[in-house]
Image: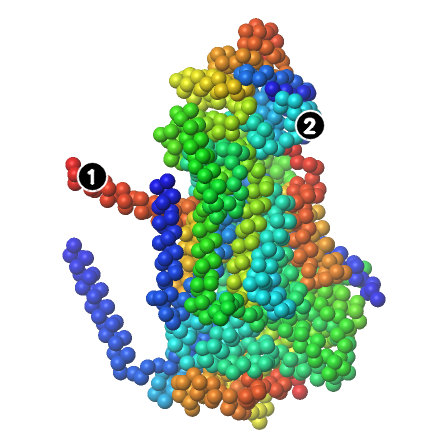
Amino acid sequence: MKRGLFSKVVFSFIFTMLFGLMAGTLVFAAPPVKIGALFSVSGPAAFLGEPERNTAQMVVDEINKTGGIKGRKLELVVIDTQGDPAKAVQGVNKLIKDNKVVAIIGPSTTGDSMAVIPVVEKAGIPLISCAAGIKITEPVKKWVFKTAQNDGLAVAKIYEYLNKQKISKIAILTVSDGFGSSGREQLAAHAKAFGIDIISNETYGPKDTDMTAQLTKIRAGGAQAIICWGTNPGPAVVARNVKQLGIKLPLFMSHGVSSKKFIELAGPAAEGIILPSGRVIVANQMPKTDYQKKALLSYVNGYKKVYKVEGDHFGGHAWDAMMLLTNAIEKAGDNPSAIRDQLEKTAKFAGIGGTFSYSAQDHAGLTKDAFVLVEIKNQNWKLVK
Amino acid sequence: MLSVEGITQIFGGLTALEDVSFSVTPRSITGIIGPNGAGKTTLFNIVTGLYTQTEGKVYLGEKNISFFAPETLAGLGLVRTFQNVELFGQMSVLENVMVGLHTKSKSGIFSCAFKLPGQIREEKTVREKAYRWLEFTGLVDEADIAACNLPFGKGRLLEISRAMAVEPQIILMDEPAAGLNSRETAGLAELIRKIQDLGITIVLVEHDMELVMDVCESIVVLNLGKKLAHGTPREIQEDKAVIAAYLGED
Amino acid sequence: MDHPGQLVQYVLTGLSNGAIYALIGFGFAIIHNATGILNFAQGEFVMLGGMFTIFILSFLNLPLIPAIMLAIIFSTLVGILFERLAIRPLKNVKPLSLVIITIGASIFIRGAAMLIWGKDTHALPAFSGSNPLYVYGATIMPQHLWIFGITIMIIIANKLFFSYSILGKAMRACAYNAHAASLVGIDVKIMVLLSFMVSSAIGSMAGIIIAPLTMTSYDVGIMLGIKGFCAVIIGGMSSGLGTVLGGLLLGLLESLGAGYISASYKDAIAFIILLLILFIRPEGLFKQKATQRV
Amino acid sequence: MIKEKRQILIFTLFALIVLLAPLFLKGSYFLNVLVFIGINTLLAVALNLLLGYAGQISLGHAAFFGLGAYVSGILTTRFPVDPWMALLAAALCAALLAFVIGFPILKLKGHYLAMATLGFGIIMYIFFNETVDLTGGPSGLSGIPNLRLGQLIFDNDRNNYYLVWVITLGVMLLSINLSQSRIGRALRAINDSEVAARVMGVNARILKVQIFTISAFVSAIAGSLYAHTMTFISPTSFGFNFSVELLTMIIIGGLGSMYGSFLGAAILTMLPEFLRVFRDFDIVIYGLMLILITMFMPKGLIGGLEALFKIVINKIKGGAQNVKR
């Protein structure tokens, strides 16, 4: 009995303290600016969502530490979409109606982005997607922007290089998920303009563990180079299988594997592979004159300090989205419509994924210079000049 | 009424029944006896369409029902009970009997889902009929209990009520007295006669010799898959081969 | 047009994937034959084998062989826990409840693995080098030889165990008639436990030997488990040659399908074959018509 | 008879609460969650007809859901078909497919049935994923029009809520009716003992195929509603994981209970919300719930609640009697 009373007293004491604390912050500080985030932190696209969430949280913490935007703190509300469009739609509704956010960054995948677009368009809340699908901003939607580079830009970068090397007959091997099928479309769409002939067109499943059958078929087809489009771990298997089969053709990968994890998984088989990537993985190798260098180093070093691992390409999308958004909030305040108008005025913003210039006709904001080509040498990235 | 002709059943090299033939006269009570493994239940399974015999024919009246499915046979008025009591455990006692009336009602999925007037009327008749069969076996008080909660003896009675609800011409009972105490067995004998009085033919597989000799008018003896003898209880009790193979063993 | 080694390569690829499927299929067969349970969590033991090995290698810094042994022991422990905690206490032993419980267990194990080891894919070093071997213009990896070797070894061990050892015979007796087995003094519960132990050990072994080729992550179990199941269905639920043939056939059909028809539909081909076999010959391709039990 | 009246009362109460709920949830995002709960309830009811009533497991029901969504989506985006006609076509398409594969697939029992339906689900997923020209492939199909009734367009949460829930309540009512009828009893009899049911004259083979077909029909309606309310679909929503999620819903809620279907759908749809703090824990919790509920609560949470309710009622009654004495 006594003990019960004691614990009750303690409990109510703690409760009052907590309540007081909360009330205190509510009364004395200006209300925080709420930003929503939709990332696929779990599920098959967790490799995108996790660094993106980490990055967004890091940016918010940094800004709050230095006093927020014009004295107002930021509050980030993260919702995990699990890569499921239905959960993304529920999430975006919650962000808009319940959390009353002024703008949203994410989602991580094209599918999730396409699913939430009708909702934000109707509610009139700006959204900066971190997914690459070209459909997201083409045709232009009033409230939707994106930071991830269009897959077409990566394709163009590879094709340009192939032209230089006088290679015109290629084989493509793409994964049968959203990333791979978008790549497959773009590879086919740009081929003609570069005078390139796709003579083998193969796919593999995201969970496949052996691609020798497809590669054997490709070898028999007589291509001069192979382009593989996928995200880990598939391309690592492809790299190993290429080595096993003794195929001597140059192997290209997509920006989907521009993380150290790929080199780790593919091991020695990664040597000599060339892929387009954002500048982030070769930040240190960029010339001093590079327009983005400062942003790149600040992101890479900041991320390493907080999370002990190197920031990657995907986290970079969230960094860009957060930066673009906070810049706009700084200038336009916390009105969603004003934020949108301000975002559209963004010009020559040096981000991680490239230099962004949005306009009424272009909500993707990047050119093919957003990508650089890197080669894997001695288990590390090397900028191809 | 029911006749089997040259039934042979081979399970992967093992002959369970070999050339068994006999017939059952209408409105009679026939017992099938024999030691364990004689093939009695196998024979029931073949007659009721659960097994497909290797050879032989089964007739119901003039009709060849050799390879009919159990559900078709129920429609023709041939029904059975099980040795291990196969009740619908999650359903109430009343509902069990109502399933027995399945062939006596016609409402399809749509009229059931939309509760069309015809279905409501039919449902009422089915319910009343089911209660009548519970009265017949004396289970009315248990009508709303879940069947799996019935004591074993009453489970047997429920199985018989359910079979009776099919309004069969012929009912096959697989060891109806197994697991019953002597009072329950006496009640069972009475019930069997009551069923016969309704003009229904009965065939039972049974180990309880007292019951068999008491109620059966004719007995078929199986041993090691072959028919050993067929006759009245008195004839069977005096049959040398039977005594040697079966009664002598006991 | 054809590259000289093309067909040989398809065949080799098919056979080596098939051996993996067969090995995973064994695990299904052993539990099914001893208990009638189809363990939907079988694939997770394949995952556990690979993940435990990588975990032990990187955190305990043991050499490869002890690490493998320890990983098999750990996976077997998980198998024992699974049987003791989720299968044995079950009172209502309907096939439906068993399906749901084993599915639940597979989700649980997968989720726990994700929480413990994260979502990353990991690679295991090859047992003996990564220089390909050339066979008639086609290539295979030394690791493939390990897979073939261990598969053959496990078939032989299985055969010996079930035909000659007392324990193996007792397990077969349980499978045939658990009640009768208990009457002659066989402890059926122990036999069920044993079947879970053996199959989780074989499953994890499979997971370990393929990890250097296929890499591993918390979610590799589902697909591999299902493929193993296909193999064992084609093979008629045998824990011997039937399943091996089933696995090899599946592997061959997949790689030839990918090579000559369409890589996109190769899994669909595998599953259509599974359905056809279930519909037409549920007793498997390599078994005589099953003897019906009285 | 009393039981029947009580059932009508419970359903009326449930329907009233559901239909009046939006009045109290104006402008709340929760209305949106309830739209998804409605669709999931419809799916759970469909699976419950098959598994809860007839005892036939399906690990591939997401395929019928997906087929409904894709037929509806493809017909309305690539052809000038009215969304309502598309919905009907989707449901009929799924029913036809279920009818055709029902005969061979439902011959299988227990584990084999589970694996065969799983295989079927994966095959369908591969087709959704690979027939890019038709389905848009992995990147999905967007721009699916909303359903409309005259001037009323189902493009906001409140309208969608009523659209989905009126259909779901209707199907729930029909399913409850079915359970207490000749067919419902025959199905439950098959669940308890297929052999005995057949001996009693129940044509188990046909009946199982019929209920499978109806289940597919309803699942496809749910799929079509999903497509028209989301306006975007992609194959990831219709994979094996979702089939297992559906199974989890009805096991947790309660096999054979339509309110259990609702409870299970509600819990699984909202669980990620509650687990915000332990974000990655949800699949571990699903797994654990599946095991524990199958082991200790075979009738699911609804069954547990019922038992609890009975105990409380008896306590109160018993208490009253004690006072009298």
Locate residue D77 relative to residue B119 in the image: left or right. Answer: right
Locate residue A211 relative to residue B239 in the image: left or right. Answer: right
Q: Secondary structure at mark 1?
A: helix
| Residue depicted at x 57% and y 46% | D210
Q: Is residue A19 above or below residue A59?
A: above
Depth-wise, is mark 2 or mark 1 nearer the camera? 1
Q: How is the image coloured?
A: rainbow
Residue at which label 1 appears: D321
> Of A97 and B29, which appears nearest the observer?
B29
| Residue depicted at x 53% and y 43% | B108
Whether residue A125 is visible to the viewer of this picture, yes or no, is: yes
In the rendered image, residue B30, in percent from the top left (x then y), is placed at 55, 16
Q: Secondary structure at mark 2?
A: loop
Whether residue C200 is visible to the viewer of this picture, yes or no, is: no
In the rendered image, residue D200, in percent from the top left (x then y), is placed at 53, 32
> Of B99 and A195, which appears nearest the observer?
B99
Q: Disc 2, disc 1: CB below 8 Å?
A: no
| Residue depicted at x 62% and y 17% | B23
On the image, which quarter does residue B8 sit in?
Answer: top right
Number of marks drawn: 2
Amino acid type, callout 1: Gln
Q: Is residue D29 above or below residue B115?
A: below
The N terminus of chain D, quarter of image: top left
Chain under callout 1: D
| Real-space CA distance between mark 2 and mark 1, rounded to the nearest whole angstrom | 66 Å
In the rendered image, residue C153, in percent from the top left (x then y), is placed at 66, 47
Residue at which label 2 appears: B54
Tell me, yes or no, whether dots 2 and 1 are on the same chain.
no
